[in-house]
Amino acid sequence: MTDTTAPGMRALTWLEAYRMRWKRRRLLWRSFRSRRQLTEVVNRTRTIAQSDILVVLVVRNEAGRIPYFLEYYRKLGAGHFLVVDNDSDDGSDQLFADQPDVSLWRTSDSYRASRFGLDWMTWLQIRYADGHWCLMVDVDELLVFPVGDGDTLQELSANLEARNRNAYGAVLLDLYPQGSLGMQTYVPGQDPTDVLTGFDAGPFRAKRQYPLGNLWVQGGARERVFFADDPARSPTLNKLPLVKWSRRYAYVNSTHSMLPPQLNGTYDGPTGREPGGVLLHTKFLPEIVSKSEIEKQRQQHFHTPADFDGYYDRITQAPDMSFDGSLRYTGRQQLEKLGLLRPVHRPKSDESRQIDEKKPEL
């Protein structure tokens, strides 16, 4: 367990700690039961090496995104992908099944009733990810971390372990195109940032929620465009996507919060001091307009789906999300300069500390 917590974290009372332990056990039991909803398509988990970093995700009809998603995370050093296909009919399942580093399960059960896929993914983590660094992302999320933490997930996780950290937080940064949504062209395998060139550098606001101690970050482009009249309902932007997994762990609300609650203290938001990355959110590719109408009818997202009908309606109107304050995305060095990426900073070795001690005072 991490020995460092972000500013603002407080200790739980004995009653809160007791309730959190039972909540975690109930969530793990739910996940165990959900295994019956999954049908194995292809299982290559015997090829997983002890040092492999695993990527776990649920998909539905994402054939256009899958080629670049796999390429991106393979370049970052992902060793194996554990995928649940939720009744795709566009060939997504076959695309994954054909990959030598993918194990695939299929289900037609309700995404919403499975806690938006968490029950399924947690079962796969219980079964296959114990002791592995594990990345939980959606297919439209691309993790970016500081240059100082290396070019691979292996380098990043080594830095985290050197600091005795078991989890790594990130802010979800919405990318959007120039011009009206849906009017651009995207081809499978293309880098989404070629099409989604703009983003909002803020503002963001963050606060701790108890008893979990999880951060709640809101703000950014989606709030500005779709929730300006009711910002309290805008999307939660903080996530804990990278975790050295244990069978005792459980996500509570998407990847926004976790149990045991100490894990939530490893990130203090895009304007904080703790190490953190960015999840580039490529939701607004041209397909978003037609997909929003479908998702409005399916009612599988959000705890109270009908409350967000207006959000989907606004997207189908194909607004132009750019404004005078939009920035053009140029890469992770830009995000570091903006303070959205913060390196882990490995602790100094005994030798380097001795050198520092010998430096003359100025």
Image (spheres, rainbow, N blue to C red):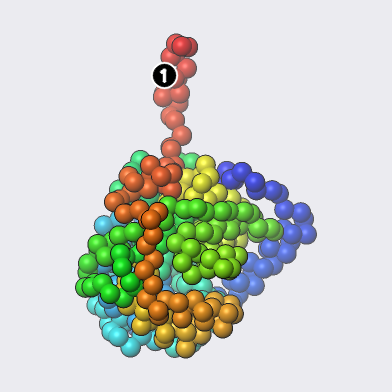
Q: Residues within 10 Å of mark 1 (few under 14, many from 20)?
A: few
Q: Which residue is mark 1?
A: 355
Horizontal and vertical percent for residue 5?
59, 45
Horizontal and vertical percent for residue 292?
41, 80
Q: Nearer the viewer, residue 277 or 348?
A: 277
320 sits left or right of 306 in the view: left
Where is residue 158, by image quadrant? Answer: top left
313 sits left or right of 148 in the view: right
In terms of secondary structure, where does tag 1 sit? helix
Q: Nearer the viewer, residue 124 or 327?
A: 327
Residue at left offset 60%, top offset 61%? 259
The mark total stands at 1
170 sits left or right of 8 in the view: left
Residue at left offset 61%, top offset 43%? 7
Furthest residue toward front: 324
Q: Is residue 161 visible?
A: no
Using the image, determine if residue 332 lies above or below residue 251. Answer: above
Q: Amino acid at mark 1?
A: Ile
Horizontal and vertical percent for residue 186?
24, 72
Residue at left offset 47%, top offset 87%? 298
Where is residue 32, by image quadrant? Answer: bottom right
Q: Is residue 343 visible?
A: yes
Q: Nearer the viewer, residue 232 or 358?
A: 232
Residue at left offset 35%, top offset 64%? 176
Horizontal and vertical percent for residue 149?
37, 43
